Structure formats: structure tokens, C-alpha cells
Image: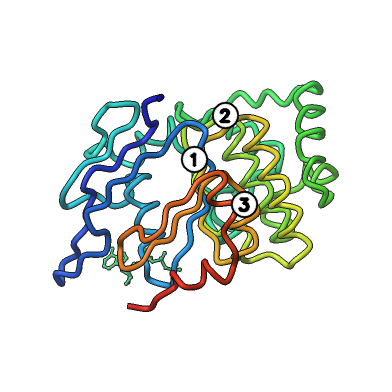
Amino acid sequence: MTNPVFSLKNATVTVANGTTILDHLNFDIDKDDFITVLGTNGAGKSTLFNVLSGDLMLTEGSIEHNGEDISHLPAVKRTSFLARVFQDPKLGTAPRMTVAENLLLAEKRGAKRTLRNRKLSAEKLKHYYELTKTIGNNLENRLQTATGSLSGGQRQALSFLMATQVKPGLLLLDEHTAALDPKTSDQLMAATNEQVTQNNLTALMITHNLADALTYGNRLIVLNAGRIVLDVKNEDKDALTEAELLKYFVHS
Ligand SMILES: Nc1ncnc2c1ncn2[C@@H]1O[C@H](COP(=O)(O)OP(=O)(O)OP(=O)(O)O)[C@@H](O)[C@H]1O
């Protein structure tokens, strides 16, 4: 048995009004995990991501990364091993910079980011062309376009590619296809699955799409009122149906 990459121990967040929004969670994330994360609105999914990313500190318990206690490590320091893609296509990319410049910037994730020496060689542009072409939404023909004028789907694809340019120790996908039309969403979901499986990324993906949650990943968790109420893997996940899954969606 290998050691978990991330380990939440008794992880709890109690907010100022006394409400516990993450409730004594014990949760290990293994290297080969691609976990789909489900739950009703307000179940604590984003809170879980926020404590992993360091945007929200635990009020009790701890988080370990490769055995090291990172409970007090600020978000900015966690970017060296963690990347996150949000639902909003506007987040995660610099609007005035071109697609190619954003990709170049992403290669420096975790390091001091500057584009003073813009090394956009022909070789690099060719690489970005091949990379963006994998998505299938014409992003490869917009490499020199300012990101702010891309379609939402193209911009979201760029955010995703930026998050995975440097292999992150943990990839957090926060409903990253939810704001896209069905075709664009399917394209990005397929590209996501390809990247995660081909590059052996450790990933968590919040989704409200039950079919996607069942189709993708090796593991599935359901949160309710800040607790994990279902955690299934491999063949147990494969055997799960949408009808069974829905039973875990309880508004508290
Ligand atoms: N910083 C905070 N301070 C106070 N309450 C918070 C804070 N962050 C989240 N909450 C509350 O914690 C609960 C869980 O919120 P969270 O955003 O994690 O839910 P979610 O499962 O991601 O929901 P959704 O599906 O709607 O995005 C909600 O009731 C929310 O209002």
C-alpha cells in the first residue's frame, strides 16, 4: 500500500456564526486517484477544495501533503504542487495576454512569474499549437489572440491546459465544464479525462452531472453537510447507478 499524497485528518471548518461547514473529515487522496465529487448545493464541496488549496484554513484537524503537515501553509505556497480550474472562464487566465503568452506563463507555475523574457520560439508555438489542437474547439488558431476575446469554451480550455502545463501534484477541477454548452462541455470533459489518465494526474472534480461523475474517474465521493456520506472506488463505483446515487442527495 502506498502512502497517500494528501491526507485530511479530522479536518474541520467552523465559521464565525458557529456553523460547522466541514465536519471532522478523514480523507486520504492516493496518487492514482481521479475522484469525482458530488453533493447538494451547500454540501461543502468548494469548502473541501478551499481547504486543500489553502484559501480557507482549518479550525481543527490537519492536512498533510506527502506526509508533511501543510495545515498552515498559505495558498500562494501551495501553487507549487496544486492547480485549480474554476467554473468561471474569466478566472485563471490573464485577459490582455495572448493564448501563447498565458501558456508560457503557466510553465512557470510555482516559480516567480515574469514574462520579461518572452521566449515564444517557433518550436514553442508549434508545441502550443499541438497542445491546443487536442481540445477540438479551434483554440490552436487563436494562439496570438488576446485571451479576453476568446469564447467562454476556448478560455476555459486554456485555463485547463494552463493548470496542467506543469504536472500538478493535485489538480482541483471546480465544476470546470458547468458554464459551457453541451458540446463544448463534452469536448473539455474528454480532454480532461485524456490528460488526467495519460499523465497519471491526481485529481478531484466537482460536478453536478451524475453521468460524468459515474463515467469518469476511479473513485467517487458524495458530501452532505460537510461530511463524506459515500466513498466508492473501482468496481464498486462501476456498479453504481444514477438512481442509487440520488439517494445520497439529501438536503439538510
Ligand atoms: N467562508 C465562509 N464563511 C461562512 N460560511 C461559508 C463560507 N464558505 C462556505 N460557507 C457555507 O458553507 C456551506 C458549504 O458551502 P460550499 O460552497 O462548500 O458548498 P458546495 O457544496 O460547494 O455548494 P454548491 O454546489 O452550491 O457550490 C454553505 O452553507 C456556505 O454558505
Circle 3 residues within 10 Å: few <14, some 14–19, many ≥20: some
- Distance, label 3 to label 2, CA atoms, is 21 Å
Q: Which residue lies furthest to the bottom in this view?
A: 251
Q: Name the residue under label 3.
A: 95
Q: Name the residue carrying label 1.
A: 83
Q: What element carries label 1?
A: strand
Q: Earlier in the sequence, mark 1 or mark 2?
A: 1
161 or 183, nearer to the observer: 183
Q: Where is residue 233 in the image (x, y as percent from the top left)?
A: 50, 46
**Label for residue 217?**
none
Q: Quick one: SS at disc 2?
A: loop
**Label 1 with label 2: CB-CB less than 8 Å:** yes
Q: At label 2, which amino acid type do we have? A: Val
Kind of residue sitting beneath label 1: Ala
On-image quarter of the C terminus = bottom left
Mark 1 crowd level (few <14, some 14–19, many ≥20, 10 Å Cα): many
Point 31% across, 68% down: residue: 225
Residue 164 percent across, percent down from the top left: 60, 36
